[in-house]
Image (cartoon, grey):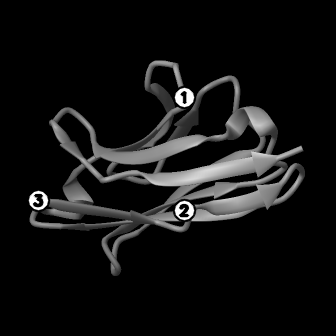
């Protein structure tokens, strides 16, 4: 199993980024996926999830700003992040839910 996260970077507050997580080594369409983040000195937290059927749920801190989608042809899950805030600064990880399969993380830094 491989989960390759990409798309992180430095953005100003109010800006947008789209993260990607390319999956391989398992049947993507049968698996729910999740995005997590870990800020310096803090525990890793759930950002949101998407079911195998494409229904997404979000944590309260990102609801209305972030959107999770998936592309079944590309075996990729996306995290569209809008109206970014400095408190969104973290390393973002994708995960195949209900397993110990994690991506390597991609850094997102939001400047004020």
Q: Which residue is identified by label 1?
A: 40
On the image, the x and y values in percent for residue 40 come to 54, 28
From the viewer's perspective, is 85 left or right of 47? right
From the viewer's perspective, is 67 left or right of 13? left
The answer to whether the residue labelled 2 contacts the one labelled 3, judged by CB atoms less than 8 Å apart, is: no
The residue located at (51%, 19%) in the rendering is 42
The answer to whether the residue labelled 1 contacts the one labelled 2, judged by CB atoms less than 8 Å apart, is: no
N-terminal-most mark, 1 or 2: 2
Q: Nearer the viewer, residue 88 or 75?
A: 88
Q: Secondary structure at mark 2?
A: strand
On the image, the x and y values in percent for residue 10 come to 71, 60
N-terminal-most mark, 2 or 3: 3
N-terminal-most mark, 3 or 1: 3
Residue 1 badge: 3
Q: Which residue is identified by label 2?
A: 19
Q: What's the distance in space between the residues labelled 2 and 3, CA to CA?
A: 19 Å
The residue located at (76%, 44%) in the rendering is 65
On the image, the x and y values in percent for residue 15 come to 84, 58
The crowding category of the residue bearing disc 1, from other C-alpha atoms within 10 Å (few below 14, some 14 to 19, many at least 20), is few
From the viewer's perspective, is 84 left or right of 35? right
Assign the C terminus to one quadrant of the image. Answer: top right
The crowding category of the residue bearing disc 2, from other C-alpha atoms within 10 Å (few below 14, some 14 to 19, many at least 20), is many
Q: Nearer the viewer, residue 11 or 54?
A: 11
The answer to whether the residue labelled 3 contacts the one labelled 1, judged by CB atoms less than 8 Å apart, is: no
The crowding category of the residue bearing disc 3, from other C-alpha atoms within 10 Å (few below 14, some 14 to 19, many at least 20), is few
Q: Secondary structure at mark 3?
A: loop
């Amino acid at each position: 199993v491989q989960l390759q996260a990409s798309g992180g970077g430095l953005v100003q507050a109010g800006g947008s980024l789209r993260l990607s997580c390319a999956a391989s080594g398992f049947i993507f369409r049968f698996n729910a996926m999740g995005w997590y983040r870990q800020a310096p000195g803090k525990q890793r937290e759930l950002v949101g999830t998407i079911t195998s059927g494409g229904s997404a749920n979000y944590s309260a801190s990102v609801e209305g700003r972030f959107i999770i989608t998936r592309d079944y042809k590309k075996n990729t899950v996306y995290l569209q992040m809008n109206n970014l805030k400095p408190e969104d600064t973290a390393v973002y990880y994708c995960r195949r839910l209900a397993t110990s399969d994690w991506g390597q993380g991609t850094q997102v830094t939001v400047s004020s």
